[in-house]
Amino acid sequence: MSVFKLIGGSTSAKNTLEYCDKKAVMKEGVHCFADTAEKDFERVCTAYGKEKGRQALHFTFSFAPDELDPKNPSHQRKALKMGVKMAQAISKHNQSVCYVHDDQGHLHVHIVMNAVSMEDGSKFQMDVSKYRYQQGKEADYNHPNLFVLREKADEIAREYGLEPMSQEKITQKTAYNRQNPQNSWKGRMEREVTSALETTTSWDDFLDTLQENQIGVVVRGQTTTFEDLSRKLLRDKKYKVRSTTLIDGLTTDKIFDHLRRNFKAELELLRSRKGNIPKNKIKTSQRRNLSLKIDLLLRCRPFREC
């Protein structure tokens, strides 16, 4: 079973590319090189004066583990080929990079596409209207309909002997999500929020980390709500969940408790590393670098007093 989804747009192509590249087991560029995609994207944006606003679009093409083994290299290559074909189907005029991930119990390909066309510099706009799809209204090449692209993804899946997911449940859980709740949209949010709580040291860092993973945060007193931005973009009614529902007991104050602990631990680590470096000319630059890191960390501390 295969599923094609639009994750959303990004105002930072660099962050989206870095996130996808970090966990990739295989990758390939379309109209660009995978290893220099950030610079390649930037050159096109600069050439047309489109450095501001949305810089990239993010899609995923996922496959059930009973059809493609996540740890099988030949299956990973197969997934990459399907991802590249899908990237070419989305747009022939935009650069893309395909990244194969195997980290969620099933193979999936992240497709990160430059929002600026190489052809004429226009910004890519996704038509998500199901009504226009049902009416059969055709859009121009830079405004493709999401539902038409899902049909194309189904064709590609069948070419490789896979069974696509039923169109009527395109925004719902897949069969393997129902068997494994951790792969649901709430399961994904729980993993990303938990990871951010363990690694970030300031409120801004926490928000930025979640934003890179298409999760929004709304705070009202002790009530914090997390939003799945990709589901929100597709106007799915189920896209948000309270922090206390997602993770038991996670109030707004508890979030800041995590940030304060991470901040103090990081600060102590940096100070201890600095103290362990002998005071001689050779080590001066290392001490200076650690001093700068400590200063930056202190500037970015959680805004509630540590």
Image (cartoon, grey):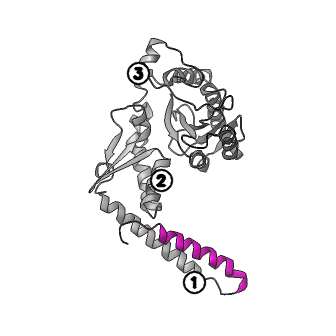
- State the residue position of label 1: 275
Q: Identify the image quadrant of the C terminus.
A: bottom left
Magenta-highlighted residues: 280-306
- State the residue position of label 2: 208
Q: Callout 1: helix, strand or loop?
A: helix
Residue 156, by quadrant, is top right
Q: Amino acid at mark 2?
A: Asp
Q: Residues within 10 Å of mark 3 (few under 14, many from 20)?
A: few
Q: Residue at x 44, y 57 (%)?
A: 206
Measuring from the top left, give residue 62's x and y in whole percent: 53, 34
Measuring from the top left, give residue 295's x and y in whole percent: 53, 73
- In the picture as drawn, the residue positioned furthest to the top comes out as 135
Q: Amino acid at mark 1?
A: Gly
Task: Give the CA distance from mark 2 to mark 1.
Answer: 31 Å
Horizontal side of 33 relative to 266 (left or right) equals right
Between discs 2 and 3, the one toward the N terminus: 3
- Observer-nearest of 137 and 227: 137
Q: Which mark is residue 103?
A: none
Residue 181 shows in the view = no
Between discs 2 and 1, the one toward the N terminus: 2
Task: Give the CA distance from mark 2 to mark 3.
Answer: 34 Å
